[in-house]
């Protein structure tokens, strides 16, 4: 919608409240709801003030920033009988009225703008894997550390519920009645499509209680916006239907984890410049892009895999990439070239390391900048030893980061490719916070330690 269309919609649809959503530094949506009588055309220029220290932007001494709604993101949502108009916001400085250099959405915009010499557009098609449970509980106390989840199709319930049960790691593309989550997925997808989200398909994934929704290609900013929207819609629809959704990379022990594989290509002069006559039908540009992503793989992971749980997924034996290699149709490689794509105009690569705990604006921006750095430097992934790998990629090539601290240490040493887009203050704040998170996690005893060491 345009600004005029937003104001007309509020009047014509009888909207009494306007919900403004913005993304904090760490990748969570935050919101404030305005009475429509308090909302006007001026809100699109003057914005709404908020305490940015609570969103990770800085300390409480200099914490005033503005959120300014983007009218093109407007959509109507129902909330317990209330009809609201929602919009995603950009973050602006109160001092000079310019975009905040720390705004994740602004950083992605700046990243795309900064590569105009290489490409005019970045096209992304993410795949969203997530788990759906009927219940979840967890607690951390000096004398008790536990979590527990349950789902009606969980293989651990076989022989208990009497229902159709999907076996361990046997859920890929299962049909009903074994796929008990088809109705929920359908409801989520119906809502997404009503909001204009370009859903391609959805299906049950490998793991028990695990599903996937995949999008068609859209530009990078929309892909990041849709990532936030998909998580929001999935959680709210699931709640109404009696489920709990988690995008955690590894919520279940010894089961398939959740990635967020991102298919991608670059466009120049309205042409897909990843298509060519080189290896696997790629262009030299695409190969250099792959080399850039893999060269900066460890540091990139500080943004694309920013939780300690991310590295519980990235272990051998689960189709999750553990080494910096690429291959044709190879789902164990960090970068896969889809073998089923035969149309030259649709040639793409797939980055498989990333997961949905990323702040999508920062994760997508860092990924694109890493790839474009490879293009500008003319890197060749073959001569650098990144492949192609035709069989299992495990144990091949350079090891990717195996922990959050390793990824953060790599980012502190290797961040030149982010220069001019990612502020140094953001990188410093990000690594400090993430290293602190890992230290906190490492302080907590876990059940396996009791099993291994309690009787020593």
Image (cartoon, rainbow, N blue to C red):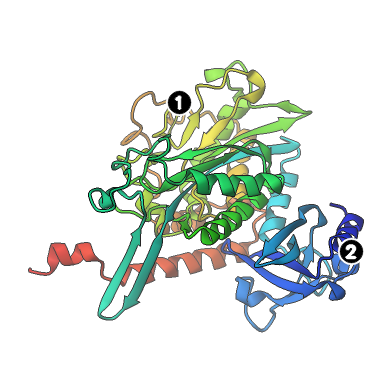
Q: Residues within 10 Å of mark 1 (few under 14, many from 20)?
A: some
Q: Residue 406: x and y, percent?
A: 40, 56
Drawn side of residue 359 relative to residue 111, left or right: left
Residue 91 visible in image: yes
| Eye-nearest disc, 2 or 1 | 2
Looking at the image, residue 252 lies above or below residue 322: below
Mark 2 lies on residue: 11
Q: Residue 88: x and y, percent?
A: 73, 60
Which SS class for mark 1? loop
Mark 2 or mark 1, which has the lower sequence index? 2
Drawn side of residue 12 relative to residue 289, left or right: right
Looking at the image, residue 414 lies above or below residue 78: above
Rendered residue at 54%/64% (across/down): 430
Label 2, label 1: how many angstroms apart (C-alpha)? Answer: 52 Å
Image quarter where the C terminus lies is bottom left
- Residues marked 2 and 1 touching at CB (< 8 Å): no
Q: Residue 91: x and y, percent?
A: 74, 65
Q: Farthest residue to the left: give it.
A: 456
Q: Which mark is residue 329?
A: 1
Which SS class for mark 2? helix
Numbered marks: total: 2
């Amino acid at each position: 919608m345009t600004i005029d269309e937003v104001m007309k919609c509020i009047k014509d649809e009888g909207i009494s409240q306007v919900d403004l959503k913005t993304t904090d530094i760490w990748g969570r949506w935050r919101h404030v709801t305005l009475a429509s009588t308090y909302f006007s055309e001026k809100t699109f220029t003057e914005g709404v003030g908020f305490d940015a220290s609570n969103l990770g932007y800085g300390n409480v001494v200099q914490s005033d920033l503005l959120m300014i709604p983007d009218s093109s993101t407007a959509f109507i949502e129902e909330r317990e009988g209330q009809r609201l108009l929602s919009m995603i916001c950009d973050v602006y400085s109160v001092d000079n009225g310019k975009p905040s250099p720390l705004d994740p959405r602004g950083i992605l915009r700046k990243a795309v703008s900064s590569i105009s010499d290489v490409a005019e557009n970045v096209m992304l098609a993410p795949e969203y894997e997530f788990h759906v449970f009927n219940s979840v509980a967890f607690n951390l106390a000096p004398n008790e550390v536990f979590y527990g989840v349950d789902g009606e199709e969980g293989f651990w319930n076989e022989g208990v519920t009497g229902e159709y049960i999907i076996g361990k790691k046997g859920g890929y593309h299962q049909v009903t009645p074994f796929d008990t989550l088809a109705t929920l997925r359908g409801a989520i997808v119906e809502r997404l499509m009503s909001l204009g989200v370009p859903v391609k398909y959805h299906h049950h994934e490998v793991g028990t209680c695990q599903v996937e929704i995949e999008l068609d290609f859209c530009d990078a900013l929309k892909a990041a916006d849709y990532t936030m929207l998909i998580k929001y819609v999935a959680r709210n629809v699931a709640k109404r239907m009696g489920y709990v959704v988690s995008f955690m990379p590894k919520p279940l022990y010894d089961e398939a984890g959740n990635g967020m594989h991102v298919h991608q290509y670059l466009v120049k002069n309205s042409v897909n410049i990843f298509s060519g006559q080189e290896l696997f039908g790629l262009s030299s540009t695409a190969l250099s892009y792959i080399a850039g992503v893999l060269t900066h793989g460890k540091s990139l992971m500080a943004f694309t895999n920013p939780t300690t749980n991310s590295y519980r997924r990235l272990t051998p034996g689960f189709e999750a990439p553990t080494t910096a290699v690429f291959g044709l149709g190879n789902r164990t490689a960090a970068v896969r070239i889809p073998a089923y794509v035969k149309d030259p105009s649709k040639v793409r690569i797939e980055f498989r390391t990333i997961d949905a705990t990323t702040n999508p604006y920062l994760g997508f921006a860092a990924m694109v900048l890493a790839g474009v750095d490879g293009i500008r430097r003319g890197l060749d992934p073959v001569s650098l030893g990144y492949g192609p790998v035709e069989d299992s990629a495990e144990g091949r090539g350079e090891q990717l980061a195996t922990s959050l601290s390793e990824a953060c240490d790599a980012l502190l040493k290797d961040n030149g490719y982010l220069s001019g887009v990612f502020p140094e203050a953001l990188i410093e704040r990000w690594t400090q916070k993430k290293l602190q998170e890992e230290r906190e996690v490492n302080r907590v005893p876990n059940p396996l330690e009791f099993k291994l060491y309690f009787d020593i």
